[in-house]
Amino acid sequence: MGKKGDALRAEVIDALERAEGPLSAYDILAELRGNHPKIAPTTIYRALAALSESGKIHRLESLNAYLLCGCDEHGHDHDAILSICDDCGTVEETVAPELLASMSKVLGKSGFEATRHVVEIHGTCADCGPEQTNS
Amino acid sequence: MGKKGDALRAEVIDALERAEGPLSAYDILAELRGNHPKIAPTTIYRALAALSESGKIHRLESLNAYLLCGCDEHGHDHDAILSICDDCGTVEETVAPELLASMSKVLGKSGFEATRHVVEIHGTCADCGPEQTNS
DNA sequence: TTGCGCTCTGTTATAGTATAACATACTCAA
DNA sequence: TTGAGTATGTTATACTATAACAGAGCGCAA
């Protein structure tokens, strides 16, 4: 693993931290173009793949976006429940292994062996809930 | 709602039935090009949106693909647990409202109100499981 | 030290997915 | 008939992702 790659991945992490929310690969590309005017999508996707494998970021399949992992334990990929507010765009990460396990169990009855859980719940967060009716 | 649109949606359903599995929007486009040489992506996406809203198909977010809904009750959009075999591509639909409800409940503790559940479990199906080791 | 093989990175091009924006046609009712 | 509202057609373009190959750097054996 090269030094350049590490530095780049750190910059991707920085961009995601600054954003405080999900970014698309091309959002990140635009951010990094500040320091690296000629950087290409491939490079970003490679960094995202590495960060995703090591569990430092999550990919939001239903938004085609990437999010800094909010949990402490890294060094491994891991699943999470992601709740997405369709109103303000906030994404919260919930760790509930028992729920994922019970899903795996239900599917296991028919012989299915789960390796990766994509669980993304859309809705409205507490701040944007119906009782707010601001504006 | 026009007759033409209904006919088109029926053709999309047909294509998905013939495929016996998920198809991408452009797969469907290619299928329908047989009857409609000049059909455009927009048209397909509009048909898919209508079918999705009425619950006749599901969208697989993690595959960018579309799947015929396997359950009986239609006329409404509804969530399902989709188990995807990464080996053979088979997708099974599992209805487990209690699981989705318990997820909603967990998230509800922090004020989140769920409206749509994207639950896609990747793994290997019974036919492709490790004990098969064919080839 | 040199040369080889391996992995990582850079670069260019292209494939694949989705929607915007506007034009046209259809349908129903006044 | 005519006009409003909705559905459909058409063109162009934006957005997302990967293929394919070139080059650089590193470690190790001869």
Image (cartoon, coloured by chain):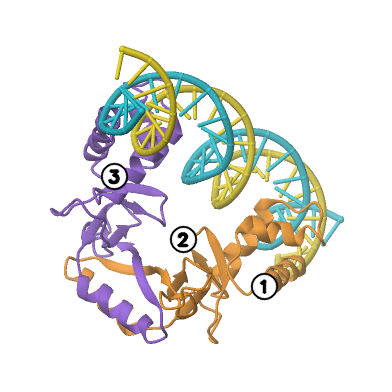
Chain colours: A purple, B orange, C yellow, D cyan
Identify the residue at image location x=81%, y=58%: B36
Numbered circles on residues, count: 3
Q: Nearer the viewer, mark 3 or mark 1?
A: 3
Three-letter code for the amino acid on which mark 2 is drawn:
Glu
Tell me the residue at 30%/50% (across/down): A53
Q: Residues within 10 Å of mark 1 (few under 14, many from 20)?
A: many
Task: Give the Cα separation between the discs numbered 1 and 2.
Answer: 19 Å
Q: Secondary structure at mark 1?
A: helix
Callouts 1 and 2 on one subunit: yes
What is the chain identity of the residue bearing mark 3? A
**Is residue A31 shown above or below A77?**
above
User: Residue B126, image x and y in percent?
Assistant: 45, 80
Q: CA distance from mark 3 to mark 1?
A: 39 Å
Q: Determine whether, in the image, residue C2 is placed left or right of residue B73.
A: left
B131 vs B40, left or right, is left
The residue at which mark 3 appears reads as A51
Circle 2 is placed at which residue position? Answer: B61
Task: Answer few, some or many: residues within 10 Å of disc 2's Cα (few below 14, many 20 plus, some between 14 and 19).
Answer: some
Q: Earlier in the sequence, mark 1 or mark 2?
A: 1
Q: Amino acid at mark 1?
A: Ile
Query: Where residue B92 is drawn, which disc sits there?
Result: none
Quadrant of the rendering where the N terminus of chain B is positioned? bottom right
Residue located at (34% from left, 65% from top): A116
Cβ atoms under marks 3 and 1 closer than 8 Å: no
Q: Are marks 3 and 1 on the same chain?
A: no
The residue pinned by badge 1 equals B13
> Nearest the camera: B60 or B110?
B60
Look at 60% across and 59% down and name the residue there. B24
Instruction: Note whether C29 is above or below B33 in the view shown.
Output: below
